[in-house]
Image (spheres, coloured by chain):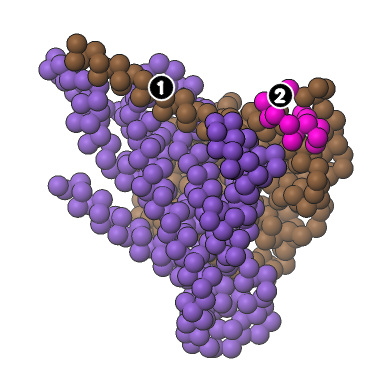
Amino acid sequence: MQIKKDEVVWLLLFIAPAIILFFLFFIIPILFLFVTSFTNWDGISAEFVGLENYTKLFNKKSFVRAITNNLYWCLTAALITVPLALIIALLLAHRSRGWKVFRTVLFIPQVVSSAAIAMLWAAMFNAEYGLVNFLLDYIGFSDYKNHNWLGNVRTANAALIGFSLCYVGYFMVIMLAKTAGISEDYYDAANIDGASQFQKDLHITAPLIKSTFFLCIILAVIFNLRQFEYVYLMTAGGPANKTQVLVVYIWNELSVQRLGRGNAAGVIMIAIGAILLLSLRKLLKSETYN
Amino acid sequence: MQRDLSSNFYFIFKWVIIISFVFYAVFPFLWLVLASLKTNAELLDDPFKLPAVFQFQNYSNAIREAGLGKLIINSLVISTSATFLNILFSSMCAFAIARHTFWGKNVLFLMITAGILVPLNALIIPYFAIINFLNLYDTRFGLILVYCAVGLPVSTFILTEFFKSIPKEIEEASYLDGCNFAARYFRIMLPLALPGLATAGTFQFILCWNEFIYAMLLTSSTDIRTIQFGISYFTNQFFSDYVGMFAAVVISILPSITVFILFQERVINGLTAGSVKG
């Protein structure tokens, strides 16, 4: 609808709150992050120090470890969680028996707060009373009877990644919704040709939900880049910085008032996110044209 | 014969996968609820054994000793206000974008929705500085403002899409009858958009209720602490009282699970509308 002259004021009034909030909490923080990352700002005074924050960060083992761990989380999500979600979505597609119930149940971890889930799974992995060790003992791996999964340098990351698989339901729900939009005609034609369910999934459903699959990978990458609560509450980055991730690293810099350094880490995090997103988009584009 | 074998295999494969993931998603919660009704000594026994007596006082202890009631009220006040403001502001903006043509409209929409892709947790230090600068550190309003802003991209996106799907005729008729801009929004569009508002609102409420890092970053006093930040204290506070911690975790997750079960079609529609198109 075209705006009448006397309604311009109304229009401005309607978009003003959103624009103000967006500037205050998106644009200004990003600019601020970038500018202060070149200073030694500590909350009181700030001096320009050039690239010192960046060189110091990249020379820190724990920071490089945080980047690799974040990438490790992203890669696991892209290569394990999302493909698994695709398999489950294919299995539940076409209103298979009980699909609604399974959809609801598998989605529940997503609605529960990450803080609560992190505390729940920290308890699951607990050496004394945790369910994980009990089950392992039960099926015969008695070596793990009192194994401290999250406290052990070798198993902490594996335990965290194992836990992250419980988020499979989120991506499954997105892909399942996409399969619901596929016309039944394709499947009818395939039935006449005597195709098995597996053939139908492989040759009809999978190609048609490819773009959604890539979208899920993009979402998974963003979530795993910005995740904080799991590592902070389950291992606090330990043992020996083995499970450190970027946001926990920034948090630690904040708590020792090295705000400039923390912001440099934030800039690097946003840059990594942008690079990952752009390359995924490129991949997605070339895939859809093929 | 060949066909039967492969479809049997498919059948078994399907149910093994589905049941194992249902197990993965739900079993920890069942264990949590059962464990929260035991004594600390029973916890070390067989995890599948029912407690001798159901220890419901774990819950009353958690509520009383840790002031969970206060935390829940804080979370409710903050989440509801932030959801209300968020839905008000984003629906106003979405109405302007979806129903009118004006200079810079597409840029505005693209800019706001691109906010979905920003890994916001990189900005914790700037947020801390801005909230301090606005003199809102350790206030409920500071948290409300941040939650309102953080959810803005998603809500604006869902609501713009929803407003676009409402037929134009009703609004045009009211326009000819002389309804002004605000009246068209409040009297015509908002009632028609109720399902969309509910979808975006459910999303926003769950986001606010579950939020942890900003609550930890921007508040310090126990008077305004939210429940998600509050329960993380249980790991220290009840150092050996695990069952108390479990009871607190159960209490903290009940509201979001309830909202989800009640509005699950909305959540799932919103999720798929918001992401399949984007």
Depth check: give the residue in front, A61 or B188.
Answer: A61
Residue B43 visible at all:
yes
The residue singled out by tag 1 in the image is B15
Whether labels 2 and 1 share one chain: yes
Start and end of the magenta stretch? B37-50
Residue B253's mark? none
B40 is within the stretch colored magenta: yes
Image coordinates for residue A57, horizontal then vertical, percent: 51, 77
- Number of residues whose C-alpha sits closer than 10 Å to that of mark 1, classed few (under 14), some (14–19) or many (20 or more): few
Image coordinates for residue A219, horizontal then vertical, percent: 41, 48
Give above or below for A28 relative to B201.
below
Give above or below for A78 relative to B250.
below
Secondary structure beneath disc 1?
helix
- The residue that appears at 53% across and 43% down in the rendered structure is A163
Which amino acid, mark 1? Trp
Image quadrant for the N terminus of chain B?
top left
The residue singled out by tag 2 in the image is B49
Which amino acid, mark 2? Lys
